[in-house]
Amino acid sequence: MTRNAERVHTDRAELDRLGHLIEQLPNGAHVVLRMEDGDAIEGIVAARPIAQVFFGPGGEEGTNAVLRLEQPALDQPESAGWRDVWVDRIQAVRRLDPE
């Protein structure tokens, strides 16, 4: 199975940033993510993401991670489902539940 990503990382500072974000995303956490494009995404972490090796657009190997967020049907049943988010696109994580 080929694993492709729009962006992959090899720089130590970026890998450390990915690791820090992953630490803030434990299983079952209710979070709001501030994304690099300014969007805010709310959901429940289905499983803590894991840094993995992917291939970038030019075939280069590097690291990234995918977060699966469950979006429950509390107030808007039509929006229930899940969403996969590239961890490197996250700028900030805010917990909505007690840690």
Image (cartoon, helix red, strand yellow):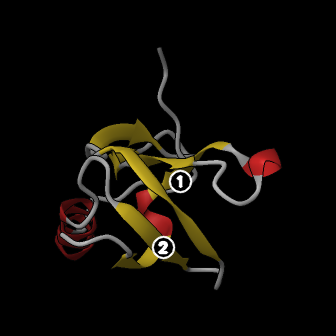
- Residue type at tag 2: Leu
Mark 2 surroundings: few (<14), some (14-19) or many (≥20) residues within 10 A: many
Mark 2–mark 1 CB contact (< 8 Å): yes
* Residue at far front of view: 75
Q: Quadrant of residue 10?
A: bottom left
Q: Could you say whether the residue bearing mark 1 is in a helix, strand or loop?
A: strand
Relative placement, left or right, of 84 versus 23 is right
Which x, y percent locates residue 8?
42, 54
Q: Residue at x 40, y 38 (%)?
A: 54
Q: Identify the residue at horizontal 22%, vertical 64% (top origin).
A: 15
Residue beneath disc 2? 33
Q: Which residue is mark 1?
A: 85
Q: Nearer the viewer, mark 2 or mark 1?
A: 2
In percent of width and height, residue 20 lies at 19, 70
The image shows residue 70 at horizontal and vertical percentages of 53, 46
Q: Residues within 10 Å of mark 1 (few under 14, many from 20)?
A: some
Residue 97 falls in which quadrant of the image? bottom left
Q: Quadrant of residue 40?
A: bottom right
Indicate the amino acid at tag 1: Val
